[in-house]
Amino acid sequence: MPAPNLSVTIAGITMKNPLTVGSGTYGHHGRFSQFFPVEVMGALVPKTIRTYKWPGNPAPRLHETPAGLHTSVGIPCNTWEHFLSQDVPILKSLNVPIIQSVIGCTEDEYVDIVERCSDLGIFAGIELNLSCPNLKQGGLDFGYDPDAAYRVVKRSKERSQIPIFGKLAPDYSSLVSVAKAIESAGVDAISMINGPRAMCIDYRTRKPIIGNKIGALGGPALKSLAVYMVWEVYRAVNIPIIGMGGVADFRDVIEFIRNDF
Ligand SMILES: Cc1cc2nc3c(=O)[nH]c(=O)nc-3n(C[C@H](O)[C@H](O)[C@H](O)COP(=O)(O)O)c2cc1C
């Protein structure tokens, strides 16, 4: 029997199947294929990058919870020049559409990295990791503020030749309004969810376990929350959604795909 055709087109990007990986969860900085070959996926979303060197958060950065992974990596990054000389040649050699995830701490930083990535001509799309505090406006994450999210998407769209994805993190009060705001700013698709904020305390020391004190939660503990949030946003917007959060096998994938009731 011939293999079924699982191809999809999302934001104009043709993928041989609807599967990709959450940014930062599948090797990065050129170290791919440690778990399975990149080419089996419909698209690859590499680790988020910035335009400048950034140390990330203090160790420890990871802690396993009973049903998940508590992390606070802090998007460490090397220089743009390092990215060009070390990562771009590897990314160019991969036979899979690449949606590069990017972040900035101001609107200008987002626009700058979007323009640079678009101009490289090697990416199929750009994903805006909106889970960054807006340093020029009170420190609320871009993705929690419909106006800030609107502006950053609108300006990114103006400067990009390729589709823009907006990645949302869970915040009950603003999730749907942010989704609608970025849709009206012209975003081509939404990726969701980024990990919700979380904290783990060592009961013996009574102190937070990871270096940054607060982090995000990923893994199976997240799945029901993620499925619910994708359902909520799916009903509110008319653009494609790439769902993630706690996916471990095909049953979880089906839960995300069947979100149309
Ligand atoms: C170690 C680690 C690093 C991550 N790095 C990023 C990142 O750089 N950019 C981003 O948008 N999300 C990042 N995430 C969030 C994931 O892409 C994903 O949205 C979240 O973990 C929920 O999915 P999961 O339950 O499958 O882990 C990271 C998650 C983990 C566990």
Image: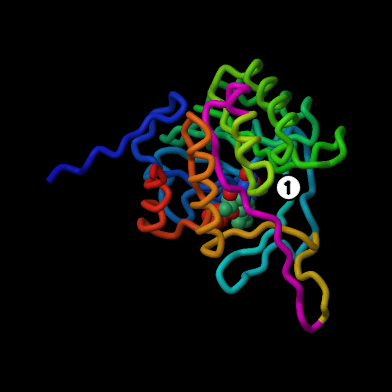
Depth check: give the residue in front, 88 or 124.
124
Question: Looking at the rendering, which quadrant does residue 135 occupy?
Answer: top right
Region in magenta? 182-204
* Secondary structure type for disc 1: loop
Residue 115 visible in image = no
Identity of the amino acid at label 1? Pro
Going 72% across and 58% down the picture, which residue do you hit? 215
Q: State whether residue 50 is above or below residue 70.
A: above
Q: Is mark 1 within 8 Å of ligand 1?
A: no
> Residue at the location (76% across, 70% down)?
209
Residue 220 location (% of width, % of height): 51, 63
**To which residue does mark 1 refer?**
76
Q: Quadrant of the C terminus?
A: top left
Query: Count of labels shown?
Result: 1
Q: Position of residue 249 (x, y in %)?
A: 39, 59
Picture coordinates of residue 124, whole percent (x, y): 50, 27
Q: Nearer the viewer, residue 95 or 182?
A: 182
Q: Residues within 10 Å of mark 1 (few under 14, many from 20)?
A: some
Q: Specify how the rendered protein is coloured.
A: rainbow
Q: Nearer the viewer, residue 224 or 70?
A: 224
Quick check: 154 above or below 229?
A: above
Q: Is residue 188 magenta?
A: yes
At 67% from the left edge and 21% from the top edge, which residue is drawn? 154
- Residue at 49% from the left image edge and 29% from the top image edge: 239
Q: Nearer the viewer, residue 219 or 51?
A: 219
From the viewer's perspective, tell me whether residue 259 is left or right of residue 172.
left
Residue 86 shows up from this direction: yes
Rendered position, 104 above or below 210: above
Q: Is residue 169 left or right of residue 219?
A: right
Of all residues, the one furthest to the left in this rendering is 1
